[in-house]
Image: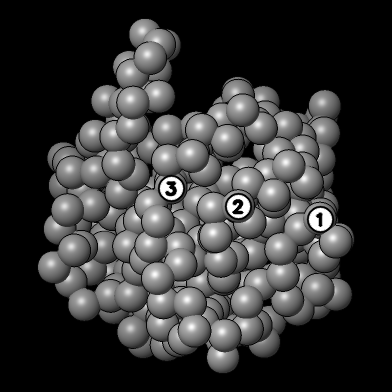
Amino acid sequence: MAATSFRVTCPSAIATTKRMLKLIVNADDLGLSEAVNEGILEAHRNGILTSASVMANGVAFEHAIRLCRSIPSLDLGIHLTLVEEEPLLSAAAIPSLVDTGGRLHRHATTFMRKYVAGKIHLQDVRSEFEAQIQKVLSQGFEVSHLDSHQHLHLLPQILRITIALANKYNIPAIRIPREHLRPYMLRHLSGISRVSQLLVLNAFCQRPTKMLIRRTDHFAGFFFGGNLHKMNLQKILQSLPTSGTCELMCHPGMEDPTTRYRHWGYHWSEELSALTDPEIAKVLRRQGVDLISYRQLAHL
């Protein structure tokens, strides 16, 4: 990494900094596109990013794997995916998860409606999740954590499947994206809708606190999801807890005018600029934040 960015603390050093906040900066959507892949690797090489979650059914999965082999310091998780992309299994094998064209349902709201109506077969979910996990593990990487696209792994019955698979494949951690409500989230009417979504997500996050899974103590990044430019990142950093462990979710990427995901409204290149900004690294140093990866969380 560049001189202006942090180095990930080695496991032996963690025991000497018990009271310091340990922050995991994790990028979602590795494998989504080559532009996203390149941005994630740049944020790790020259910024504060420590971990990334790969989409086994992303169209740029093979490209992502090649890049990860060149930089083994990047910690790798799996971004389990039940919507928008092509499934790994055939439509006949997971009929409740696909539309009439054999593709995973186009939007999380469609999936949720079917889930609530009892039209999502849990065995289909388990089969597709397991295929995605096996595909990543077959590449020889140590997988440190599981999370999911649109956080669908938090749905109660699906969470049980996720935990069971994590235990089966010795994957030590699962993301629980419970982000505390902060004053900056309430300062503009435009943020009310996102706050409502955050509160719903937090309600789903309450149940896992009673389950025996490894997770961070805190989480940040949902409210500014896809829009973590420098000013928004600074707001989050100013509101970080002072101790324990925390994951900061982000979505860096290179500029890509041809992306087919423009409807998401994400600002990938702005997030990359923020994550590699030397001033951001200085803020973390002043606050005494210790950057770690999900891989190291297992040693705490």
> Which residue is farthest bottom?
12
The residue depicted at 73 percent of the width and 42 percent of the height is: 279
Tell me if I can see residue 66 in this picture.
Answer: yes
* Sequence-earlier tag: 2 or 1: 1
Question: Which residue has dot 2 on it?
Answer: 286
The residue depicted at 76 percent of the width and 58 percent of the height is: 5
Three-letter amino acid code at the position of disc 1: Thr
Q: Which mark is residue 4?
A: 1
Nearer to the camera, 60 or 76: 76
x%, y% of residue 197? Answer: 31, 30
| Label 2: element kind | helix
x%, y% of residue 252? Answer: 69, 44
Q: Is residue 173 left or right of residue 198?
A: right
Task: For the N terminus, give its image quadrant.
Answer: bottom right
> Which residue is farthest front?
286
- Using the numbered discs, state the Cα–Cα distance from disc 1 to disc 3 in whole angstroms: 21 Å
* Sequence-earlier tag: 1 or 3: 1
Q: Is residue 164 left or right of residue 235?
A: left
Nearer to the camera, 291 or 255: 291
Question: Which residue has dot 3 on it?
Answer: 240
| Label 3: element kind | loop
Q: Quadrant of residue 51?
A: bottom right
| Label 1: element kind | loop
x%, y% of residue 215? Answer: 35, 68
Task: For the C terminus, give its image quadrant.
Answer: bottom left
